[in-house]
Amino acid sequence: MNILVINCGSSSLKYQLIDSESESVLAKGLCERIGIDGRLVYQKTGLDKEITETDMPTHKQAIQLVIEALINDKTGAIKSLEEIDAVGHRVVHGGEKFASSVVLTDEVLKTIEECNDLAPLHNPANLIGINACKELMPNVPMVGVFDTAFHQTMPRKAYLYGLPYEYYEKYAVRRYGFHGTSHSFVSKRCAEYLDMDLKNSKIIVAHLGNGASISAVLNGECVDTSMGLTPLEGLVMGTRSGDIDPAIMEFIAKKENLNIEEMVTVLNKKSGLSGMTKGGSSDFRDLQAEIKAGNQLAADAVEVFCYRVAKYIGSYVAAMNGVDAIAFTAGIGENVALVRRKVCEYLGYLGIAIDEETNLKTFGDEVTLSTPDSKVKVCVIPTNEELAIARETVALVK
Ligand code: AMP
């Protein structure tokens, strides 16, 4: 089956066409600046990237352009729309309503809309993408794959906050967690790769990218994760603060004369690695260059980042009363040896040892980093959220 995977944001849209039998990518790309001016990036596998500046006032027009590129005579990956068997959509927030992927019926779409409140920046954009695809491909089955679904197995002790219970009852305020598609994919693949029985395993997944989160996966089910009601909680990220004393919000808001929305924007967009380096780049390639050049703030930011990751891993070892394997994934986890080394050094007390030579030459490969005598396996498992979405989609429409 050919599955079109769509990840739709408010002004951008990423897509991949995946052949589910061979699990290969036939074509991929993105639409940027939707509603502003418009830019289509398209790449058929094996050919050069094509970039077209073109008007795309709405998501529907953007998806129309994607379809035209996919069936284009010269560089199209398929001959006609009929060759798209299903569409898999990434949906950010499924609240407590969705513990797994679903076929997107009108009723399901209404229920997703009810979750908009929980992810006001993401869910409405996801829905716009779904509706645009439905209009353009009315007979093609559509599936929604939720970032939050994998974490719905968390026990109450992990998802309830120490807040008045009415806020949970009235507004569903609780920990949901995100990056679930990645945590699910990587934990399963980690067990497979290490020849472990997933149903009898304790795995910690460190998804370290521009957004970053950690999860504790016990016997294949998520029992805790670092992101919360929103993706702001947990690790220090590219521009997000992660955990802070909540009272800091009032303190800074008063000093800087900010309202609550402005304060939350600071925490989401102006903090993390970027904020800690006074608005510097949050990209680890730049941070490492800055450290080499003697920038103390960059060095501090990286230390804080690694320390927070190590503390979360330690707490999840406690949550599961042990750990068999730790999997690093996403842009930083897959590519930054410095982070993996520093994090593992903190975990020496668990009997963890990694081979630094292997660590230094690992960029995006599936690799075991731990030495044979390490008490816990440590590996790098590249994530592939698009493939995970395609697999979920096939499972539901076949
Ligand atoms: P993601 O959100 O998973 O795409 O991760 C993006 C982040 O991964 C970037 O901001 C970088 O910090 C980091 N990253 C990606 N590729 C590399 C690389 N080759 N070397 C160092 N850091 C990288």
Image (cartoon, helix red, strand yellow):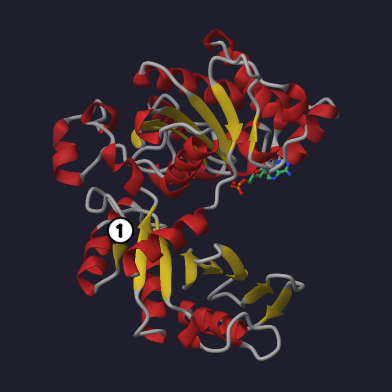
45 lies above or below 347: below
> Vertical placement of 396 versus 321: above or below?
below
State left or right for residue 225 relative to residue 334: left
Query: Residue at left 63%, top 40%?
Result: 366
Q: Nearer the viewer, residue 164 or 184?
A: 184
Residue 334 at what x, y percent from top left?
65, 39
The percent coordinates of residue 89 (x first, y second) are 41, 65
Q: How many dots with numbers?
A: 1
Residue beneath label 1, please? Answer: 116
| Quadrant of the rendered image containing residue 74 | bottom right
Residue 348 placement (x, y as % from top left): 59, 11
**Quarter of the render that holds ligand 1:** top right
Report whether residue 57 is seen.
Answer: no
Depicted 37 relative to depicted 220: above or below = below
**Res. 144 in view:** yes
Residue 284 place in picture, x, y as percent: 71, 38
Describe residue 77's horizontal placement relative to residue 376 as left or right: right
Between 278 and 186, the one lying in front of the other is 186
Circle 1 SS class: helix
Judge by depth and name the residue closer to the eye, 38 or 141: 141
